[in-house]
Image (cartoon, grey):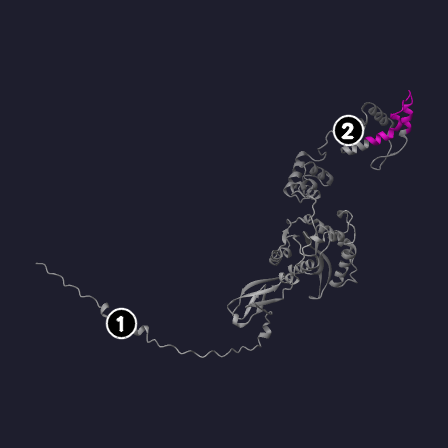
């Protein structure tokens, strides 16, 4: 029993004694009054029906007369802070198990102790393990203190920060494969206004799908200044980093396994799941297009026009419209389209192909063995072109079966040019020099040695 419960119990006892505590009782009036109270039932602060013995009521009466309300509080246990069923060694072991693996739950710790023979089965309840962990500061709320501090925050204006994430939706037939596949919903949320710039359901949790969502969001709601996403591969790829650098968007990744850092879009996902995704009639919703129609009906018809408590009772659309002057709009739609393209250099192979992201593309034969510059779309992986002398040439993926029947006739080689006659030949020059050495190369005559006398 904690201090709050002890105070509530004291107030319960005071209410039972009622006016007996304030009356000036004459001799012989107390005991009959207490006897009448002992025959009644009272409901305590926990909703329990209780009857109090006359002797107990008399004890409460005199305790209040001498010590006031504080004296009516129950005495704390003498062994408070210690388990009655667990020895100090077991309490220490329970704490060590939790420190060794913070993911261990109280039921798991109890089961491990039973399997290890440290306690008998049903000897200890899970609540006893939980109390031990709480006293040692190892319960879930206390262990949050080991994590970085988290504060309630908000972007200062519309378009300053968008939160991006993906939600797993229902299973629908995929026309591309002819098989059922789980739908992935990519979405973006403006941190200041809570408005949804764009969301879209589709198949595959890929980078180009998220880039497509980002493109439509920018076209509808302007260029965001910062983008907060997690560490999934669809948010950490080269194309996204290149695009953010081109559009001057600060790309921020949350800490791994820290979903609460993107709490606003996580809260939106919960509302979307509760009100739409989990209540879909899959007999009527059989395609991604039908699902997207219902998602946007909810976003535009309900979510954007409903007052939010976190927005002081305003709707996301009202907050967005009030901060419209802060939005950073693209200066030229064509420039926005160009920003969603990138360039890369690759070496053309001897078979007139270049390899780009696992696909072979055909290039003109005269570029074989040379480095070529490719331009590709961030939104459509199949749109690849070749830049040659500032001219963009669309290229296509190689079709090996069709190439088996293509003509391979080469143009006639150019006529050979006449060779100049110099009259010099290394073997002949060596032979002439050996047979007819020049005077400068003749060996000098040596003087004969003198005789000694």
- The residue where tag 2 is placed is 75
Residue 273 figure quarter: bottom right
In the depicted view, which residue is nearer to us: 186 or 83?
A: 186
Q: Which residue is mark 1?
A: 433
Residue 125, visible in the rendered structure: no
Instruction: Tell me the CA gap for discs 1 and 2.
Output: 126 Å
Residue 155 locus on image (x, y percent): 69, 48
- Quick one: quadrant of the C terminus? bottom left
**Residue span colored magenta:** 10-36
Q: Residue at x 70, y 53 (%)?
A: 325
Magenta highlight on residue 367: no
Is 391 above or below relative to 226?
below
In terms of secondary structure, where does tag 2 sit?
loop
Say above or below: 82 vs 367. above
**Which mark is first along the chain, 2 or 1?**
2
Residue 136 at what x, y percent from top left?
A: 67, 36
Report the residue at 79% width, 55% height from top.
Answer: 302
């Amino acid at each position: 029993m904690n201090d709050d419960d002890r105070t509530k119990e004291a107030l319960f006892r005071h209410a039972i004694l009622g006016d007996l505590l304030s009356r000036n009782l004459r001799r012989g009036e107390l005991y009959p009054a207490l006897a009448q109270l002992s025959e009644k039932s009272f409901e305590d602060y926990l909703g329990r029906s209780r009857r109090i013995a006359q002797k107990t009521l008399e004890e409460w009466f005199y305790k209040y007369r001498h010590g006031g309300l504080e004296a009516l509080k129950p005495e704390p246990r003498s062994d408070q802070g210690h388990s009655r069923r667990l020895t100090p060694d077991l309490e220490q072991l329970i704490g060590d198990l939790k420190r060794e693996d913070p993911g261990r739950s109280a039921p798991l710790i109890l089961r491990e102790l039973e399997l290890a023979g440290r306690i008998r089965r049903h000897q200890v309840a899970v609540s006893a393990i939980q109390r031990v962990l709480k006293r040692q500061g190892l319960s879930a709320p206390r262990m949050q203190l080991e994590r970085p501090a988290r504060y309630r925050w908000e972007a200062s204006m519309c378009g300053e920060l968008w939160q991006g994430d993906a939600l797993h939706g229902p299973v629908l037939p995929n026309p591309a494969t002819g098989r059922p596949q789980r739908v992935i919903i990519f979405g973006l949320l403006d941190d200041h206004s809570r408005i949804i710039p764009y969301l879209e359901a589709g198949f595959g949790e890929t980078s180009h799908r998220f880039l497509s969502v980002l493109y439509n969001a920018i076209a509808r709601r302007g260029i965001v200044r910062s983008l907060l996403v997690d560490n999934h591969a669809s948010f950490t790829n080269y194309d996204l980093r290149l695009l953010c650098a081109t559009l001057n968007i600060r790309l921020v990744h949350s800490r791994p396994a820290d979903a609460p850092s993107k709490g606003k879009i996580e809260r939106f996902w919960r509302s979307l799941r509760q009100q739409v995704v989990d209540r879909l009639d899959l007999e009527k919703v059989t395609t991604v297009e039908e699902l997207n129609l219902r998602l946007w009906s909810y976003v535009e018809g309900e979510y954007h026009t409903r007052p939010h408590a976190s927005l002081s009772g305003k709707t996301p659309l009202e907050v967005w419209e009030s901060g419209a002057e802060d939005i950073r709009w693209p200066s030229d739609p064509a420039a926005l389209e160009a920003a969603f393209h990138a360039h890369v250099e690759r070496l053309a192979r001897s078979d007139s192909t270049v390899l780009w992201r696992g696909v072979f593309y055909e290039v003109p034969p005269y570029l074989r063995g040379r480095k070529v510059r490719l331009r590709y779309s961030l939104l459509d992986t199949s749109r690849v072109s070749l830049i040659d002398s500032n001219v963009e040439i669309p290229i296509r993926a190689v079709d090996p079966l069709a190439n088996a029947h293509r003509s391979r006739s080469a143009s006639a080689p150019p006529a050979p040019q006449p060779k100049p006659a110099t009259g010099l030949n290394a073997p002949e020059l060596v032979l002439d020099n050996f047979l007819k050495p020049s005077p400068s190369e003749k060996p000098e005559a040596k003087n004969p040695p003198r005789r000694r006398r």
